[in-house]
Image (cartoon, helix red, strand yellow):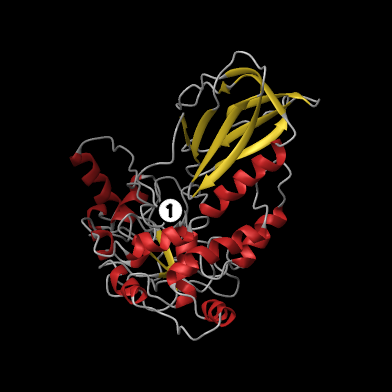
Amino acid sequence: MPEGPELYLASCYVNSMCKDLVFAGPVEKSEVSRNPEVPFESSAYRISATSRGKEVRLTLSPLPKAHPPQEPLDLVFRFGMSGSFQLVPADALPKHAHLRFYTISPAPRQALCFVDVRRFGHWEVQGTWQPGRGPCVLQEYEKFRENVLQNLANKTFDKPICEALLEQRFFNGIGNYLRAEILYRLKIPPFEKARTVLEALKHRRQDPELTLSKKIKAKLENPDLLELCHSVPMEVIQLGGKGYGPDREEDDFAAFRAWLRCYSVPGMSSLQDRHGRTIWFQGDPGPLAPKGRTSRKKRVKEKSNPEVTDLEDSVPVPKKKGPNRARKPGKKKPQKESEPEAKGKVGSTRGPKSKPQLKASAPTSPGDKPGVLEGKQRPMIRKRTGSTRKRKANSKASGSPSSFLPLSQKGDVALGSSPA
């Protein structure tokens, strides 16, 4: 989210890019934007910008003899999560240009656009600085410091210092990455009570015998929290660029990332405050840290494990359950010991044995001898013809009573084969 330094750089960008440009015609708003229409149209006007904390004000000033005659118009912008200004060719507008101001000279025609990808930004017609915001930490440092120290009895300072630093009534321009950098440099636990941290500054006085140069040196070597609220944003401004304008380069972002010491830096811990904002820090979080939450350390992304991101905890990744994979060669799965089976065994060896198993008299197959089958099939016995008396008579004549033969032999006899 753009913070005080980014809003200040945005105003500088508008002033530097538009100082020699003349704009004309109506102000266009995109169809998808929910912000108000800008009822302004002039034959010739100029644009200038100023910033204060987390706000930017554009002033549209008609030139002398421009028509229709009208007073200058102020538009106050709050950038939300992704707002910025860009000056582009009029025939190559960015996709998310939600407010557009067109030039007439010099040629070619250009457009100053308010670009907001996430559409959280807002503008106010004939707006003023938001009354609930305090003095700017960048451009009104003395007023800012006085406003904080004179209001330490306010309930805002009962909160942890990391949450108080986001209160724009007192810290107008400080945001998430700035609060982390400020607290880190002073080794202040983010969840220390704000009043405890700031109360000592109220009575801080320098030796009156020191010369002005020594006083300045002492402040630079041992700055307090309120002084860092001014000097740390100034460091960001001195980096320059940071992505504003169509000619932004990756070098701007690389310089900013190299400048960060704590915010989203590997090795630092993080916690969410009561408002769900992540605060980065090192060491003890402080006595007012949210209960039931554990701090997370940012780790460096490992190339060998693509599933682990640089924001994940250093915990082992559980193995996924899935189908069995093929076994590696040389490692055979041990087989269960089983009793050798004779060929011709009928039925399955699993489960309770409800019927006696039948064995064939010789190792045969269904194709060798009809009537002797393997597996779970029942033995097939031909239908006997004739009466019982006739069969008994035949058996007596042959001298081999078939009624006392084993089942397999009975089957053989029944199928026309004689016993051995």
Q: Quadrant of residue 170?
A: bottom left
Q: Quadrant of residue 105?
A: top right
Q: For the view shown, which residue lies furthest in the right direction?
A: 107
Which residue is at a point 25% across and 55% down the rendered structure image? 401
Please identify the quadrant where the C terminus is shown.
Answer: bottom left
Which residue is at a point 45% across and 63% down the rendered structure image? 179
Q: For the view shown, which residue lies furthest in the left direction?
A: 389
Residue toward you, 368 or 190: 190
Give the residue pinned by disc 1: 135
**4 to 25, vertically: above or below:** below
Q: Is residue 310 visible?
A: no
Q: Residues within 10 Å of mark 1 (few under 14, many from 20)?
A: many
**151 to 124, vertically: above or below:** below
Q: Kindly identify the amino acid type of the residue bearing the numbered disc 1.
A: Pro
Q: Image check: 251 left or right of 307?
A: right
Q: Quadrant of residue 348?
A: bottom left
Q: Position of residue 115 (x, y in %)?
A: 59, 35
Give the tally of numbered discs. Answer: 1
Q: For the view shown, which residue lies furthest in the top direction?
A: 68
**386 to 314, vertically: above or below:** above
Secondary structure at numbered mark 1: loop
Residue toward you, 351 or 246: 246
Q: Image check: 349 left or right of 299?
A: left
Q: Is residue 77 visible?
A: yes
Q: Position of residue 18 (x, y in %)?
A: 70, 36
Q: Position of residue 6 (x, y in %)?
A: 57, 51
Which residue is at a point 35% across and 55% down the rendered structure image? 276
Q: Position of residue 201 (x, y in %)?
A: 37, 74
